[in-house]
Amino acid sequence: MKILITGANGLLGQKLSALLLSDKTVTTVLTARERLVFPAQGGEFRTMDITDAKAVKNVIADVKPDVVINTAAMTLVDQCETQQDLCWKNNVTAVENLIEACRAQKTRLIHVSTDFIFDGSHGPLDESAQPNPVNFYGKSKAAAEKLLIDSEINWAILRTVLVFGITNDLSRSNIVLWVKENLEKGKSIKVVNDQWRTPTLAEDLAMGCYLAAKKNARGIYHISGKDFMTPFDIAIATAEFFNLDKSLIVPADSTTFTQPAKRPAKTGFIIDKAKSELGYEPHSFKEGLAVLAKQIVTPVA
């Protein structure tokens, strides 16, 4: 099986690349806008900007992958709100480009989506929940999903929630690293206690992508962690795990934060379908922290 990954330099992209490169039955082709930030031993690398329709068409026609896994996206929620044209280009137009290229080569497309397509009125949610985004990032991701659902190609959508982890040249932080870094510096932090999520270890999301590719999954799957937590819960658990000062963590109502983009109050996922159909079994949040801690002590090669 030949699998092409978009966004190989991202947190998920790097974890998925490592997983695929360890499987000798898979030919792995890694793509990114520019150079790779990690060594891809045993894989092939191509530069590919997914917002460039011609480049996408040419690379996929040349590589002829069995599966494309799209991990690339513009995910900074507030930036998406303030730079809507750029967000649409990266999250919707890019998916249109991938769909067209995959249609021409009869290639399967696995697309990573988000809990932010939902309005936050209730949770956890299963795959039958109806999208109703409350911010532009969510609107762009919901639009991309609709493109896939309405297309004639072989597709799967993997929705996820609040991904955390660590890897090489990480271009942005995530909640666990942010909490750990600030507490280690003795800084007090305000953390939201009225939003709920099922935080997802990057390795678990990568495994979900891998299983979906290997098992020829079709349709929508919820791929996340299994612990239903507020960001405040996440911060406290992180402090406890790393023996940091919990008294520096101040609970805060989401209305006390001024952000360009509204956040859904309650999401989180029910992952029974992924468990039963894909054999997906995520770590607990505490187990995920242990995985991350080991990588901090022993940096990823």
Image (cartoon, rainbow, N blue to C red):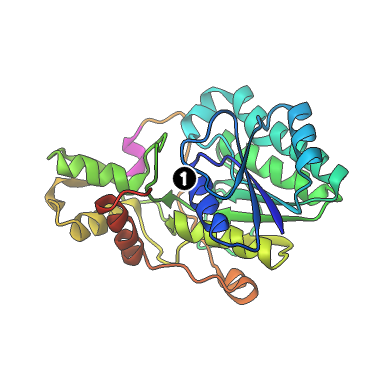
Q: Is residue 77 above or below residue 228?
A: above
- Residue under label 1, please give it: 11
Quadrant of the rendered structure where residue 147 is?
top right
User: Can you say whether 179 is above or below 91 in the image?
Assistant: below
Q: Residue 287: x and y, percent? A: 33, 66
On the picture, is 226 further left or further right than 194?
right
Q: Nearer the viewer, residue 51 or 44?
A: 44
Mark yes or no: residue 127 visible: no
At 54% from the left edge and 62% from the top edge, which residue is drawn?
207
| Residue at the image point whose x is 50% and y is 53% from the top | 18
Can you see residue 214?
Answer: yes
Q: Furthest residue to the front?
A: 42
Seen from the viewer's position, the closer of residues 25 and 66 is 25
Please provide percent x and percent y for residue 289: 31, 59
Q: In the rendered view, tell whether residue 37 sits above or below residue 283.
A: above
Q: Is residue 216 left or right of residue 251?
A: right
Determine if the magenta segment contains residue 254. yes
What amino acid is labelled 1 in the image? Leu
Residue 109 lies, in percent from the top left, at: 73, 50
Residue at 55% from the left image edge and 37% from the top image edge: 135
Judge the density around disc 1: few (<14), some (14-19), many (≥20) Cα neighbours within 10 Å.
many
Q: Which residues are the magenta region?
A: 252-257
Q: Is residue 249 magenta?
A: no
Q: Is residue 197 left or right of residue 294?
A: right
* Secondary structure category for the residue under label 1: helix
Quadrant in the rendering for residue 144: top right
Which residue occupies 48% across, 34% down? 76
Where 91 sits versus 43, above or below? Answer: above
Screen quadrant of the N terminus: bottom right
Give percent across and percent down for residue 241.
21, 60
Q: For this view, does 281 lie left or right of residue 45?
A: left
